[in-house]
Image (spheres, rainbow, N blue to C red):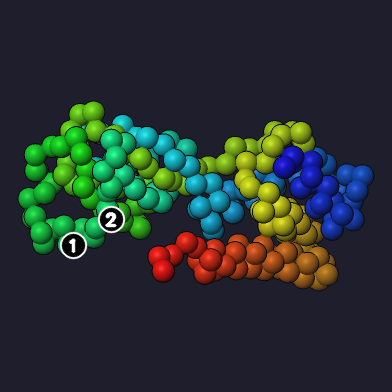
Amino acid sequence: MKASRVINGARILLKDPDGVRWDDSTLLRWLNGAQLAIVGVRPDAKATKVDLDLVPGVEQSIPAGGTRLLDVPRNVAGRAITLISRDDLNAYDPDWYSGSPAAIIKHYTFDESDPKSFEVYPPAAAGAKARVLFAAIPTDCATLDADVDLDDIFEGPLIDGICYRAWSEDGDSAPDAGRAANALATFMQALTGKSAADQASRPARK
């Protein structure tokens, strides 16, 4: 999906097909902001897998350009890695932080208050590698011909995000303030509603 497709869709709603009120660079800037906002609400919108070289020890970080950890499913060598609470791990092995390093990781812990970091058990040895799934920051669209860095299913929220910013700028009038509020509500409903639908339709064991 090209940036021009999203921009043109927004211009239809804004009744500005010729770019008289808002130029392309302004709408592109708001498009890029909408991409970031979508990933903020729906981190899975830009889910990215990498084989991460773990730092020796317990404390690990997702790659630069990531916003939050989503999962650490397995060692690159193949063994599964399971999520465990830090409290459970502390109760099981109070000295796990200073345990013997290993090349194969068994568990990881994650704290929502520190979304770019995680901890591994046992402590990683030099050369340990894990498959990591994380939310990445979308690449900005520099021109109308650039590819939007999100799936096509997010076209509607992107248009709503642009219109919200445009109508907010003209929000001194009651009609535009109302349009801005409606665009923001539609933006959020599309994302949170989709999240609920994804949860309901996810693969599940019978």
Q: Which mark is residue 83?
A: 2
In the image, what residue type sits under mark 1?
Answer: Asp
Which residue in the protein does label 1 denote? 87
Q: Are marks 1 and 2 in contact (CB under 8 Å)?
A: no
Task: Quadrant for the N terminus, please.
Answer: top right
Q: Amino acid at mark 2?
A: Leu
Q: Is residue 155 visible?
A: yes
Res 13 quadrant in image:
bottom right
Residue for point 21% across, 58% down: 86
Q: Position of residue 177 (x, y in %)?
A: 76, 67
Instruction: Name the quadrant of the C terminus.
Output: bottom left
Q: Residue at x 8, y 55 (%)?
A: 94
* Left or right: 189, with 145 as reference point: left
* Residue that extends furthest to the top in the rendered view of this protein: 127
Residue 142 horizontal/vertical position (percent)? 70, 33
Instruction: State the residue in front, 12 or 195.
Output: 195
Left or right of 138? Residue 172 is right
Mark 1 against mark 2, which lies toward the viewer?
2
Rounded to the nearest whole Å, what is the CA distance between mark 1 and mark 2? 12 Å
Query: Dot 1, crowdedness within 10 Å: few (<14), some or many (≥20)?
Result: few
The one nearer the camera, 196 or 167, is 196
Side of 140 relative to 113 (left or right): right
